[in-house]
Amino acid sequence: MRRLAAISLILAAGFSLSGFGVAAREQPPAEKRIVPFHGNLPACEDAGVLGTLNSRFAARESGYWHSPLTIVNLEYPRQIAFRTNGLDVVPRRYCTATVTTSDLKRRKVDYAIIEGDGFLGFSWGLEYCVGGLDRSYAYAPYCKMVRP
């Protein structure tokens, strides 16, 4: 019985080292797909990105949470990562900034600009999370899931 177990262990090791085991298939870069992505995303401090962030935050707070909170000031937007998930994944630019909300509290906001995530896939999309205001825990813990 021990001899059979040893032989099966040796065969399993041999197959995994020889390439007969399960291997991840190589993925083409996003730029070389049939419908390619280009990685041309707006910068973190782009006026369109910041305007979208402001309007979506105000709409979510008033429409969903019935809260009067708005962003009154946004400071120090900067990139923290770009395409960290690999070249075969949809391009994303990860950003962070500091916001002051209408209750005069300063909070950290993390956001991701995603290529092809806009209307019908023709433009970029935006995911964001304001620290301390993720009431549904969609990006929990403390907005970690929107960061790289």
Image: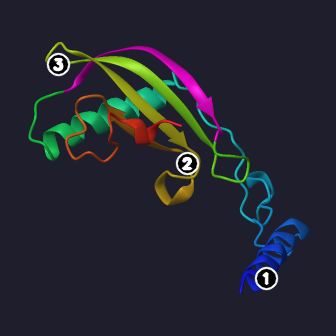
Q: Provide the residue designation for mark 2.
A: 123
Q: Vertical placement of 3 versus 119: above or below?
A: below
Q: Dot 1: what SS?
A: helix
Residue type at numbered disc 3 = Ser
Q: In which quarter of the image is residue 26?
A: bottom right
Judge whether residue 41 can be spotted in this image. yes
Residue type at numbered disc 2 = Ser
Q: Which residue lies furthest to the right in this view?
A: 18
Q: Dot 2: what SS?
A: loop
The residue drawn where x is 70% and y is 52% is 37
The image quadrant where one finds the N terminus is bottom right
Assess whether mark 3 and mark 2 are in contact (beta carbons under 8 angstroms): no
Q: Provide the residue designation for mark 1.
A: 3
Q: Image check: 70 left or right of 80?
A: left
Q: Disc 2 or 1, which lies upstream in sequence?
A: 1
The residue drawn where x is 69% and y is 42% is 39
The image quadrant where one finds the C terminus is top right
Q: Provide the residue designation for mark 3.
A: 102
Disc 3 from disc 1: Cα separation: 73 Å
